[in-house]
Image (tube, helix red, strand yellow):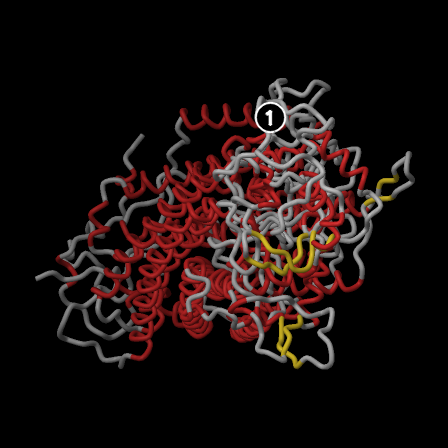
Amino acid sequence: MNPLGVQDSPEPHASEYGDLSTIDRSVRIPVLIFFASATLWLVIASVFWLLTSVQMCAPNAWWTFPGVSWLTFGRSYSVFLNSFVYGWASSAGIGVGIWLVSRLCGVAARGLSLLISAAVLWNIGLGLGLLSLLAGFSNGKELLEYPSYVGFILFLALALVSFWVILTLQSRRPGPLFISQWYLVTAFLSFPWAYATANLLLSAGAAASGVSQAAIQWWYIGSLIGLWFTPICLGLAFYLVPKSVGCPIYSYNLALLGFWALLLLAGWTGMSHLIGGPLPAWMVTISIVANVLMLVPAIAVALNFHRTINGKFEVLSWDLALRFIVIGTMAYTFYSVEGAMISTRTLGRIVEFTLVTVGHTHLGLFGFISMVLFGGLYFIIPRLLDRKWLFTQLIKSHFWLSLIGFGLLLADLTVGGILQGFSLQDAKIPMNAVNDILSPFLLGQSIAVFLIVIANLGFAAAVALIFLAPSRVRKSGKIASETTLEVTVN
Amino acid sequence: MSSPHDHQVEGVEPHSKDHLRNFGDEGSASRKELPEPEVGNAPIPFWLLGVIGLGIFWAGAYLFSFSGGFKADVFDHEPKFGVQTGGSKSAPDPKVVGKALFSSNCITCHQATGQGMPGQYPPLVGSEVVLGEATNHLIAIVLKGLQGPVTVKGQTFNNAMQAWEAQYTDQQLAAILTYIRSDWGNSGPPITADMVKQVRDEVKDRKDQWTWAEIKKIPPKNLTTGSGGNPPQDQQPAAAPAPGAQPPPASAQSPTSGSK
Amino acid sequence: MNKLNRLFFGVLVLFGASWLGMVAYPYLTFAGLQPNKDDATGEVVPTGKPGTAEQGYHVYAANGCVYCHSQVVRDKSDGSDIDREWGKRRTVARDYLFDRYIFLGASRLGTDLTNIGARQTDPQWFYRYLYNPQAFSSESVMPAHRWLFRTVKINEEPSSDAVKLDGADAPPAGYKMVPTAEGKALVNYLLSLKKNYALPEAPEPTE
């Protein structure tokens, strides 16, 4: 047995070995553009996240820019949301998707001009979107704020990538479709469809009037989370988890169940945000049912991962990318459980309109999606650049600070939101008093966000360093592994 | 059922820390990766199938019970068939009701402490207008609003208070006024819905907000001792001159109040 | 599942089902709604908004008001909305019939605004609130929207547009504070927010 545990013959036993680096090199440029821009957008989103958090604590303090119209809370918050969702998470997700589709199809990528055009268009759209929101041209609908011309540009970019994905799948090497490929197909077919529908029907022109706007908006948000981000992140996890621990996925049948259940339910989940709202009762009820049944794919996926990695948990001690991914998928389970709970009428009517829903959204966007994407970027970037991460301590600090910061944020928003919810239910407590109850929690939010922002900046620094570092490997200092992020210990 | 680890790919050591001490810097890390993942074929556990079955059963029951027949104009998931449930039949304490109503709108200007804001909104605590004998003036102010300068407790306020007659019923206004006359150390006889109704009828032709000068021209009446209505609780009227006497000179000007 | 086509078909059918239920159905159903005509008075509700109020939609959207304010009144069984005087009855689909853009909102850091135009009828109140929310509500985290106002010299007499501000907020002598066109549009929009008419599908709850 080879003491290194890896094959040292030029042609390893599995024929795709040598091809992996060819494949990686073929998609390197567009994927790195998406990753680099994603990191930049993460920095922008983090700055605005911190700004909005402190604006909630001290709306009139000079250092929160009161009275500056383009930085007012209402605009900063839309910039934070959109930069985070479309700038960071979607860019990183598209990059991951492209890389994963290439690898799993086993062919060197062709039609790169499609992808590079998409990357450029995507960022142009995001940049125009950022300026529009700051200038006050917003649709005022959560996650659909970009004006319609920006939405059109972003949709074009998405369509180009999806087209490329389908082309690549058609020309893949023969063999069964791997689990991740099911998820990626779902993501790249559903999301452009959802995005186009929502933008056409909701922005300028407002083809849909009245409450149908609310229905379409929440359908879109449910699809964004459940059929865009969730499949990309689960697809990544289904590939990297078994690969990193050297064991196969526990059960094909469980994976099948989890996949089809997600596809069946996810589009229906959005409406439970409108309990008591002006939509027919059946729409809200069906949403509640869908949210509760989402426990099925969550359990299926959690069980599958747990039994895959069971007995191999020590890999987490040195494989830092895997750490992010495992924490992220655990967060997915929590997200689904919390989602099922707060979507019921009994609990939902209390926590509606409170910080609890904010915390839940952040659990999904940061705890699950961002953590998995961090893991993905930590795995993929060195392979595309043929370099190593320089200071693994930075990566470890990023991990722990993210975990602590986010844990604090979730606890703070959930507890504060529950208190807010009960206070709102009691008509004898005026709004002023409710806000009084909230103020320590808004302060806690600022502190937690500050920690997360520092962690994100650490990530950005690591990415900047690996991009800008010379290609020579440093012989001194700790060296990250090439197959995983293992660190040699003294 | 065999352990998933039996399917370990051959020829590859279980991962350990030792084997990565040397690697060159040539070539891609991908060449040294573990092989591509495979998928085992363990069956779905029975308990999970049971849970799913229960879930589908629950889902169906919930969906058909609470969907209002899938009609587009049914918004309550549990439509009420006639009798309203809940709510006690005994008359609630007007002070409690009044405080809740006060807290939704009036509090924005007059504040929860009833102190108002210096230079902007007059206080209600110890206010001559609130506690004075001319209860019809108090009611008229709340019904039609007030604008222009007015003095309360020696301080002048020059603001505008909107009319509240359209927003509140007689019962609700009576509750609010009863409340403000009984909290923060204030002590005045309660106002009843009949008193409010009486004043509402008297001033119904007026379109604009009052000015204080116009209020003073209204003959003051102490409706709590008049024939207007019986206070629900046994209270002595505040010591005051007989009905018909001039109201105290200082007056409160309430600015436009409202909820947040 | 070896066939890509089966996957495509699956996505089309299953995602398409949610598209049908959550997009096509509401779009078609609610587009056909008609306002309600009261048999006794002949009154038709809801009514559309005046022109300047329509412009106010964009100002409301631009400044992100929806991130803290909701525009939904829930039933008594779901919350204290009615007890808080945010409305006399729950809101239903027809209430939003003529709303070109709706902002139901998902957060109540601030009060609900469905009927703010019924609770506050004086534009001055809105101007002053937007200028300095903390003067009205000390714990409020609402930003002061000062860019919706500008200071101009007083010509001969103060104009009716002038916002009455006192104390530290007052403009310097010889000047008055007036709302910009955006400010006026926003306030007109807020003044138009009233849904306090009766609709048969949403009876007022009995006390």
Q: Is residue A470 above or below residue B187?
A: below
Q: Is residue B201 above or below residue A128?
A: above
Image quadrant in which you'd find residue C49: bottom right
User: What count of labels does the image hold?
Assistant: 1
Does any portion of residue C107 appear in the rendered image?
A: no
Q: Position of residue A127 (x, y in %)?
A: 54, 74
Image quadrant in which you'd find residue B202: top right
Q: Position of residue B201 (x, y in %)?
A: 81, 37
In this picture, residue A179 sits left or right of residue B227: left
Q: Is residue C119 above or below residue B26?
A: above
> Where is the N terminus of chain B found, in terms of image quarters?
top left
Give the residue type that dot 1 points to: Gly
Q: In this figure, which residue is indicated by the disc labeled 1?
A: B60
Q: Is residue B244 above or below residue B260?
A: above
In this picture, residue A136 sits left or right of residue A435: right
Closer to the camera, A171 or A79? Answer: A79
Image quadrant in which you'd find residue A111: bottom right
Dot 1 falls on which chain? Answer: B
Closer to the camera, A403 or B24? Answer: A403
Q: Residue placed at 64% from the left, 63% from the top?
A: C127
Closer to the camera, A473 or A269? Answer: A269
Dot 1 falls on a residue whose secondary structure is helix
Q: Position of residue A141 (x, y in %)?
A: 61, 57
Closer to the camera, C158 or A4? Answer: C158
In this picture, residue C190 sits left or right of residue A99: right
Does any portion of residue B156 appear in the rendered image?
A: yes
Q: Position of residue B130 (x, y in %)?
A: 60, 42
Q: Residue placed at 62% from the left, 28% from the top?
A: B63
